[in-house]
Amino acid sequence: MRIGVDAMGGDFAPEATVLGAIQAHREVHSEVRIVLIGNESQIHEILLREGVSSSNFDIVGTTQVINMGDHPTKAFQQKPDSSLAVGFGMLANGDLDGFASAGSTGAMLVGAMYTIKPIPGIIRPGIASFLPISETKTGLLIDSGLNPDASPDVLYQYALLGSIYAKEVFGVTSPTVGLLNIGEEADKGNLVAKSTHQMLKEATSIRFIGNIEANRIFDEDSADVLVCDGFTGNIVLKEAEGFYTLLQRRGISDTFFERFNFEHYGGTPLLGVNAPVIIGHGVSNANAIKNMILQTQKVISAGLVVKIKEALS
Amino acid sequence: MRIGVDAMGGDFAPEATVLGAIQAHREVHSEVRIVLIGNESQIHEILLREGVSSSNFDIVGTTQVINMGDHPTKAFQQKPDSSLAVGFGMLANGDLDGFASAGSTGAMLVGAMYTIKPIPGIIRPGIASFLPISETKTGLLIDSGLNPDASPDVLYQYALLGSIYAKEVFGVTSPTVGLLNIGEEADKGNLVAKSTHQMLKEATSIRFIGNIEANRIFDEDSADVLVCDGFTGNIVLKEAEGFYTLLQRRGISDTFFERFNFEHYGGTPLLGVNAPVIIGHGVSNANAIKNMILQTQKVISAGLVVKIKEALS
């Protein structure tokens, strides 16, 4: 198994990415090969300084970097030798089994859409984010920002994609699906939520448990998969992030709330495309990068893309 | 000044409402008369038990109650002698200067739309909720659930309504307005947010400070007025409520987070209708009811309806 890592992606790259890869190397399965893509001399320098043999990794040298300020679509054309463009090229060619980056999310989406492309039948891919539910359970929120104007049929597919992820990666036998809404009754919500509710209620391949109001998101009886449009999902996640920051600022430490620390998850999967792609947080430190790589390993091992194709056919 | 209180509204009525009114009576201005509308004998019984003279209040006897399970529109027709219907009737006739209830929000909206009606020029009234921002500042979120599918021109009016409220009731000289969105740039968000951003940017009567992401809602530099559609607003509020519940459940007590306790605010104003209407939380206890009544006094004193009419003309 070959996991590609964008060594130049993220605010603290390549320092954090290479250190994270070194940590991940100690924890991944023996058959995993971590492929570091980026500035070769910088990568070697960090490995040397850390006393880690370069032979532990495959290193693919690139000369360009797509920055946060670059226009996603243009950047891909103007910087063909960037770590992101090369990484997606390798993924599309089958030289990688999965690709992870904490770089520009916009550029990653462009890369995914134009190189590996959406799985046939998928209207719009979505980003799934992790939600800490109670002390041990982790839920999935989909979409967390990719499609701010998602239609009911897109949300229906998100329910399907999320269910497959929860089953294959989290190992939940029969994942429950909830629709994020502003009331429990079927006729509550905006037009998209009302139509989605009807579609989910009639679906036989989805274990729909109804609407979930936002005060129940983190409750024990919340759903394994929480479906919403990307606008709402992004706001839910960022509000939780804001709360976590407030707790830290006020010196409150608590084992449950510590699970809101994104570092533990490392990255969020882009679902509905033809190969495993994991998107890391821009401010990822070495620990977050390590978890991003371990997350990628999990998604590859689960054979998620094949499972999604099967479900759609 | 005559403040009407639905003595039968809320899960703990009439016990909590009458006790709350007794507490409020001690704190309102001397010229305020609290008008209790509901089951006369039950009201008298509680007052007697508490050793409070009935002459402190005006009591308007009613024989019916609109319950949470009642269909809002039908309930108004079928229960003309309910405390809610009588209260709105008095408000429409000018027998009250403002009306507050912790009863069915749906029925209150129906009552407001059909009796006192929206202010001419207002496309859709909205509900403004309070947001604790930093340790001392209180912000306003509008709409918090009334219009899940609000169009940009409705959101534009919410910015105006919120600004007037923040100025006249909170006393903020020149309130800032932010648009809740999923990115800071003008081209971020769903279609409604993008169009609203343009409208707000061009508005001369509104102090627009741009998009606010959800992780900044409770930050010191957040806006005095945060504008969003009712779907998103309701989710933001309920997520905060969920977090507050989690903190309590985990035994974490903190002065800042205590400001997330709705009791302190008592109720949220319905803005854009022809008379002051305050909507209380269904689970209001006596303290919440007291604050709902004090909140109503504030809104009446501020002459909000006149100010809104002036701004629209």
Image (spheres, coloured by chain):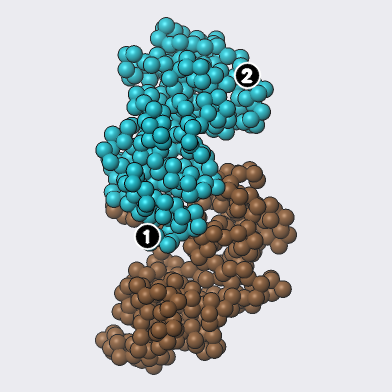
Chain colours: A brown, B cyan
In front of the other: A148 or B174: B174
Q: Quadrant of the C terminus of chain B?
A: top left
Query: As drawn, is A91 to the left or to the right of A282?
Result: right
Of residue A99 and residue A190, the one placed in the foreground of this image is A190
Q: Residue at x 65, y 45 (%)?
A: A186
Q: Which residue is mark 1?
A: B184
Q: Please, is residue A19 above or below residue A176 in the view?
A: below
Kind of residue sitting beneath label 2: Pro
Is residue B18 shown to the viewer in this render?
no
Name the residue carrying label 2.
B80
Q: Quadrant of residue B269?
A: top left
In the rendered view, does A296 fall on the left or right side of B80? left
Q: Amino acid at mark 1?
A: Glu
Whether discs 1 and 2 lie on one chain: the answer is: yes
Element on which disc 2 rests: loop
Question: At which x and y percent is residue B70?
Answer: 64, 29
